[in-house]
Amino acid sequence: MHPPRRRAYPRSWTPESVARDDLVTTTSARLGPPRRAPVETVSHSVNRFTITIDATAGEFRQQYEREVPPVPMEDLRALAACDAPWQEMVALMASAAPLGFAIYHTIDADPFVRFAGDRAYCVSYLMGNHTIAERMFRHDPAILLYAPLRTAIWEDAKGPVYFSFDQPSEQFRSFGNPAITVVGVELDRKMAALLEHLGLTVPDALCTSAA
């Protein structure tokens, strides 16, 4: 009677890797082929506004960051640590961001892309207000795909400077929930007020959108 034939493994394999391979093979045979999970596809369009700036990128960046301040993260953590009432969070953001928006994160590409020889400039922001976003989040947590909003100050090698962002109501309308869309329209109006405060042209669509 011949002895059972042993599997041949490359010399680089270790006993641990052989055991792991046997486990994967056994598990795959037991579970069968992977199941395809359902995928929902939502097609939607959005207006992107690009406004020409009559200033240098540095000058407008200073103005923008002065009117849209950083989120007061230490204060937010303090409220969370003591389990403060939500209304205290609303009051804090109203005080910290009088125009309704604060900066959650800044992405400055300039120090990195210059290594590739690029002469263009862009700094982008995650800008918003989580106390406003919460009014949409309660209906669909996936709204965080678009909240905070994305904005960008940029210029190509030839100039001039631009300020770009997508229309909030069109992004949030894609969730098909009127309770979310109405907050998106409110954000349109807040964006219009911010642009006016910055001395920029206000696109008509921000003032005429409807839920």
Image: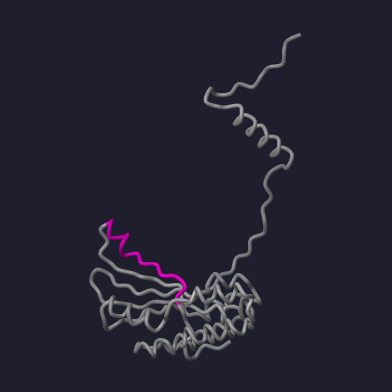
**Please, which colouring scheme is shown?**
one colour
Quadrant where the image shows the C terminus? bottom right
Residue 36 coordinates in the image, percent (x, y): 67, 53
Name the residue nearer the viewer: 135 or 40.
Answer: 135
Left or right, 195 with respect to 42, comes to: left
Instruction: Assess whether residue 105 is covered by the magenta stretch.
Output: yes
The residue lying furthest to the left in this view is 158
Residue shown at 60%/65% (left/top)? 41
The residue lying furthest to the top in this view is 1
Residue shown at 46%/88% (left/top)? 98
For residue 94, above or below residue 165: below
Left or right, 128 with respect to 181, comes to: left
Name the residue nearer the viewer: 153 or 130.
Answer: 130
What span is colored magenta in the figure? 103-116
Residue shown at 28%/67% (left/top)? 120
Residue 73 coordinates in the image, percent (x, y): 50, 73
Quadrant where the image shows the N terminus? top right
Left or right, 161 with respect to 4, comes to: left
Residue 33 coordinates in the image, percent (x, y): 68, 44
